[in-house]
Amino acid sequence: MIRLIILGAPGSGKGSQCKWIKEDYNVPHISTGDILRKNIAEETKLGIKAKSFIDKGELVPDELVIDLLKNRLEENDCKERGFLLDGFPRTLSQAEALDEYLNEKGISIDKVINLHVPDEEIMVRAINRRTCENPECKEIYHLVYNPPKVDGVCDKCGSKLFTRKDDNEETVRNRLHVYHEQTEPLIKYYTEKGILATVIGQEKFEDTVALVKAVL
Ligand code: ADP
Ligand code: ZN
């Protein structure tokens, strides 16, 4: 049982780190971005509300994501094995709502990993990112550093790769701005709680893995 949060700017490589952490620690990986995108694809009420914000690179309103997250944490896998939060919290009020929820349950977060990558590096990465459309797979490729063997096709499952609508230059720039304004204050928040560890994201995936392992 472990309860983790991974913080990092959009495109910092959080998602890729989460993939091995969830396997190694047998912990449910909860990405609010993935849950929101699934709701958009299924055209749920939540999805319809969230879509316009996501497409512009803005944050979805706190009350929507807080509810969504609390519902997810109520599921059995989280009760039994904990959680790895990816993309939540993203604002101070989300962090406070999470703390309040955990306090009520008498549980706490073990560690917050702050994955740091410079903005310029993130811009290059996001524009080159391709994601597997298979929701069971979601493998991430980089056209330069980690290209698929066949253009546009996932090596792992053969599904099509796509470019997320929010992975274009203007939207990425906006998401970075939003990150600095709204999410970066969480670094101080969790540092003061004594549970934050910063890892500098490396160019090579394996190098970052080694650094994350060292802090976990
Ligand atoms: P990235 O980390 O690359 O930005 P995510 O998949 O985490 O991608 O999120 C995509 C989008 O979903 C965000 O830009 C935002 O609009 C929305 N989103 C995800 N998580 C949250 C959250 N905790 N609070 C508000 N909006 C969120
Ligand atoms: Zn795939």
Image: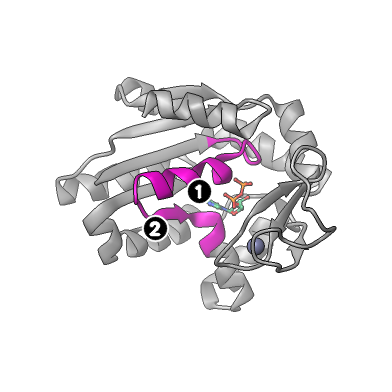
Q: Amino acid at mark 2?
A: Leu
The residue labelled by disc 2 is: 69
Q: Residue furthest right?
A: 151
Residue 30 drawn in magenta: yes
Indicate the secondary structure of the residue bearing disc 2.
helix
Q: How many marks?
A: 2
Identity of the residue drawn at 29% across and 57% down: 78
Kindly report which numbered mark, 2 or 1, lies closer to the viewer in this rendering: 1
Which of the 4 quarters of the picture holds residue 13? Answer: top right
**Of pointers 2 and 1, the one earlier in the residue sequence:** 1
Q: Amino acid at mark 1?
A: Lys
Q: Within 8 Å: ligand 1 and the Cβ of disc 2?
A: yes
Where in the figure is residue 84, as x and y percent of width and height? 39, 47
Q: Nearer the viewer, residue 174 or 23?
A: 23
Q: Quadrant of the C terminus?
A: top left
Q: Is the residue under label 1 in contact with that under label 2 (CB below 8 Å)?
A: no
Residue 43 drawn in magenta: no
Q: In this rendering, would 115 be left or right of 163?
A: left
Q: Nearer the viewer, residue 157 or 122?
A: 157
Q: Which residues are magenta?
A: 8-35
Q: In this rendering, would 121 be left or right of 181?
A: right
Where in the figure is residue 89, as x and y percent of width and height? 44, 44
Q: Is residue 165 something that shows in the picture?
A: yes
Q: Nearer the viewer, residue 122 or 173?
A: 122
The residue labelled by disc 1 is: 19
Q: Is residue 185 something that shows in the picture?
A: no
Identity of the residue drawn at 46% across and 57% down: 65
82, above or below 76, in the image: above
Q: Residue furthest left?
A: 106
